[in-house]
Image: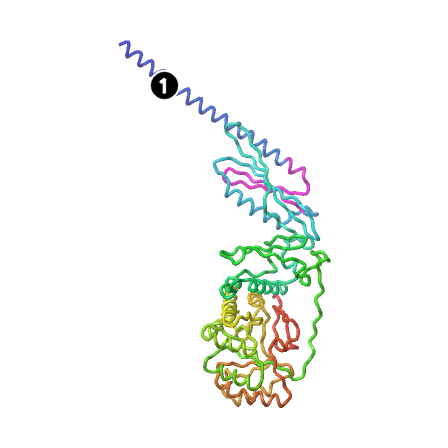
Amino acid sequence: MKNKRKILITLALCALIIIYGSYFIKNQKKLAIEQFRTSEKQLIKEIKQEASENPSHSLVESTQDDSDMFLMVPTDSQATMIKDVQEDMAKLADSLIKNKDKATPTKTVLSAKVKNTQQNVTFYEYEKKQYDWSKEKKKWEESTQPLKEKTLINQLTGNKLTLGDIFINQQNLSKLSRNIQEELLAAAKDSKKDIEKILALPQLLATQTDFTYGDSKITIPFHQKNAYINTYTINYEQVGRFLNPDFISSHYLKETPIETVVPQSKVVALTFDDGPSDKTTPAILAILKKKKTPATFFMLGQQVEKFPDLVKTIADDGHELANHSYSHPKLTDLSIEDARQQINRTQAAIFKASGVLPEYVRPPYGSFNYETAVAIGLPLINWSVDSLDWKTKDSKKIDTEIKTTIGADSIILMHDIHQETADALEKLITDLQKDGYRFVTISDLLQTTPKPLTVYYSSTNRQDIPNQ
């Protein structure tokens, strides 16, 4: 009986201890939560107070997963938040929240500070001040960390600094892209093996804002997977004629030579499209050699891959090699990437066959717009005289069409895939030479340095392609 009573008493005491313990724990948790909330309110109050004392910034708040983010966004002279800085800070904040320890309550203050000011450019660098709640110490633990991200603002526009700001326009950037290709090919141990990767590097675009901008150079990253190079540095001393004096010291600037086109009487360029063809191109080459007449061949990449030896022969005979796309689609009907692939595949094929990287593109059907011209990145060559050999398939009509429409500095369109063209060629050259005409390549006809985003119809008829 006594033992039973002891057991009951023991059980009762245990129950009381459990009840009290449970109450104590709940009470402690409640106190801890109250203490956390009180401390949290005080911290937020202090953050907002500090923000209110900084008139050159506006405070933007966001809450996600028990984490508060406070963005101290700089403002302009009208107290308006600088849009591009605000957007970059918002992206950075999202990244920080995504990567944080979600088990720990956190308050983060992200601030943008002016690091330095270069010629018409303001540099904003970012700092993260983070407060993590320590349950053990029952207080917020503060840490400060500078971040690697930067935003560069063009003071003249109030927007992000772009490559187009520094290098004036897309035309200059397309030239630089070509220069980079040539430099990398010259330095490559096996250029024919590396050509595809070099051509696949992203183009330099006027809208691009992802780069490192310095006093004497600019470094451009290539984020493409398995890129041939990860970064490329452009030293201002090497590209002085492309630089904008609004942003670059006059020490590096160079005047662009003024090039003039001297009208030439009866100097014309024969051009052949859609080849090479093993059936007709050899005959055309034989006639050109016999008549000592240079020409320019706008080749299809798929034909180049079929007849690489013929491409090499064309180059060895002193003719100019140019690009006419890979499979002759209307480039304006394609996506920008597909249009670029049409050009790059052909560039690579011609380079592998001949060691020549073409300087010109003739878009199929003569069709282009600004977007495709940017994707191509090279001067466009159309024509002023169409032989209509593709339509008439008649050697006499081909001869008549050219002779009745030819001008002093014409670019003549023919195709080296038609037998009728080969049949008409020798007599045509002979008659035109007797009439005082001289034949040259496209490069010799143009006289001046050809420009990307420009279409040439003759040496005196050239048009810049506007961004509409």
| Mark 1 residue element | helix
- Location of residue 379 (image quadrant): bottom right
Residue closer to the observer: 68 or 167: 167
Which quarter of the rendering shows the N terminus? Answer: top left
Q: Position of residue 467 (x, y in %)?
A: 61, 65
Residue closer to the observer: 143 or 19: 143
The answer to whether 273 is drawn above or below residue 50 in the figure is: below
Report the magenta residues as a range.
49-75
The answer to whether 218 is drawn above or below residue 449 in the figure is: above
- Location of residue 429 (image quadrant): bottom right
Q: What residue is disc 1 on?
A: 15
- Count of marks placed on residues: 1
The answer to whether 349 is drawn above or below residue 24 in the figure is: below
Residue extending furthest toward the left: 1
Q: Position of residue 198 (x, y in %)?
A: 53, 62
For image coordinates 59% across by 90% down, the residue present is 431
For image coordinates 62% across by 33% down, the residue present is 46
68 falls in the magenta region: yes
Which quarter of the rendering shows the C terminus? Answer: bottom right
